[in-house]
Amino acid sequence: MEDNRTAVIVGAGQAGRWVALTLRAEGFNGRIVMFGDEPHLPYDRPPLSKAVLHGTADLPQLALLTAAKADELRVEWRAAAVNAIDREARRVRAADGSETSYDWLFLAQGGRARTLPGLAPHPRVATLRSWEDAQRIKALIESSRHLLVLGGGWIGLEVAASARQRGCEVTVVEAAPRLCVRTVPACVSAHLQALHEGHGVTLRLGQAVQQVEPGEDGVRLRLAGGETLQGDALVLGIGLVAEDGLAAAAGLACDNGVLTDASGRTADPAVFAVGDMANALQGGGRRQRIESWENAQRMAVAAAKAALGVAHDPLAEGAPWFWSDQYEDNLQLLGLPDERLRIVERVVPAKRQRIFFFCEGARVRAVAAVNAGREIKVARKWMLQDRFPAIEALADAGVDLQKLPTTAASA
Amino acid sequence: MSNWTPVGHREQVETDNPLAAEVGELKLGIYEVDGELHAVEDVCPHAMALLTQGFVDGCEVECPLHNAVFDVTTGKHLRGEPCRDLRAFPVRVVDSRIEVCPVPLD
């Protein structure tokens, strides 16, 4: 049966790709037009701070949607930014001058790397968001003896680890008193600090930057405490700004991202926003903008299903999940760790494993785990079924977590 | 199909607890699903990780590093990070010894 409807996707990344895949998987037979402001089909961004900086991954290996797959799925991909949305006429205008009418509009634009106010672009200063950014940082790492990293969050730490592994001297400057302060409790920050110091990274914590002075021979950072750091190049990893300008200009409510429900619905029934750019309801009326690969997929799938009227609850799929690879370690977070919860620690030195369970009563609410991907997925199953082993048993490194008997937490 | 190679004992594999085996350079995971053994390659095609160290639930294994999920009875990639299917290999039990043939099925 012919379907005259058109889905327009603005943004060609993990989220945009999952909107397209899900629309087709759910049987949508109409047009799908995907706009991206980069000259590439959707590619996977997590390797940009790791394998790409090591020179072991090329763009084709990062493909999330190849040209062949786009053809097969009949996704019309356009390498053009969208400049304006006319919500009344249900039409977008792209930078190439074209206009496209839509029945549904999916905004999946992600965000842009935050930079410092007043800091002009400079060849020795870089941020990381795109393939091209990663190529620049790779070249800076290769030509630098000492790399400065501003920001001790995930991007800053992954870049620091990659640069260190490639032989750079690395100094990380962070304004907060500990690493990854927005996403993990102090116990996990302490683990990350020991990991980086153990690999020879110099950390300057609790140090605000007063001035950045890039020059021909390097970059100087003047810290508020009076210290001056000198390096060959500077990478800024100071956060992501939701790309919500297009949505705001179209009159959609925005506050640190487009305001949506858990499935990416905006106040306009024809418009959805998903992934990094969506400040979404997370259950219990709480709002949060989650920057992660898994959240981009989860919201994109939910929005595509919501548009088609397919019953689906993204919050029932379990707690948010996140990973970071640094040096030889793999760190995973499940749920939102909160240090006010009871923390049970499990350490298995032979496997270089360290797991923090964040518990409330008989339940595990969140998990932070180093080199324990299997265990974190065992915990995910407990949380989905709301059945848990005895909390005391979690710390016993001698038992296999999957073999622990569980009981219903509500019993 | 004369190159059956012993890789371990039957008791070394149980439901949700696979055996990591090696035949020359080839790394294999041997899984038990509903009493039957299945052998698939053990290195996740997405990134360097051994799937036998991942989470096994029924016929599915989830990579310990990221979230690629495979059916261990067929090798098919089911969900998660985009990557190819796993190659599956013939496996049999002879006198409680597990033997695999290092030539992929299909």
Image (cartoon, coloured by chain):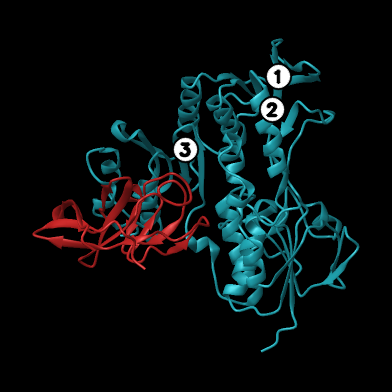
Mark 1 residue type: Asp
Q: Position of residue A83 (x, y in %)?
A: 86, 57
Image colour for chain A is cyan
| Rendered image: mark on residue A140 | 2
Which of the two discs, 3 and 2, labels the residue nearer the N terminus?
2
Residue A358: % across, % down: 41, 42
Q: Pointer 2 and pointer 1: residues touching (CB < 8 Å)? A: yes
Cα separation, mark 1 vs mark 3, equals 41 Å
Task: Label 1, secondary structure: give it.
Answer: loop
The answer to whether dots 3 and 2 both sit on one chain is yes
Q: Secondary structure at mark 3?
A: loop
Q: Is residue A38 left or right of residue A145?
A: right
Q: Residues within 10 Å of mark 1 (few under 14, many from 20)?
A: many
Would you call the spot at circle 3 few (<14 residues within 10 Å), some (14-19), or many (20 or more)?
Answer: few
Name the mark nearer the viewer: 1 or 3: 1
Q: Residue furthest right?
A: A97
Query: Could you tell me if residue A395 is visible in this image?
Result: yes
Report, in whole angstroms, how far the alpha carbon at label 3 lies from the one at label 2.
41 Å
Picture disc at residue A232: 1
Q: Amino acid at mark 3?
A: Arg
Q: Which mark is residue A340?
A: 3
Q: Residue at x 48, y 50 (%)?
A: B46
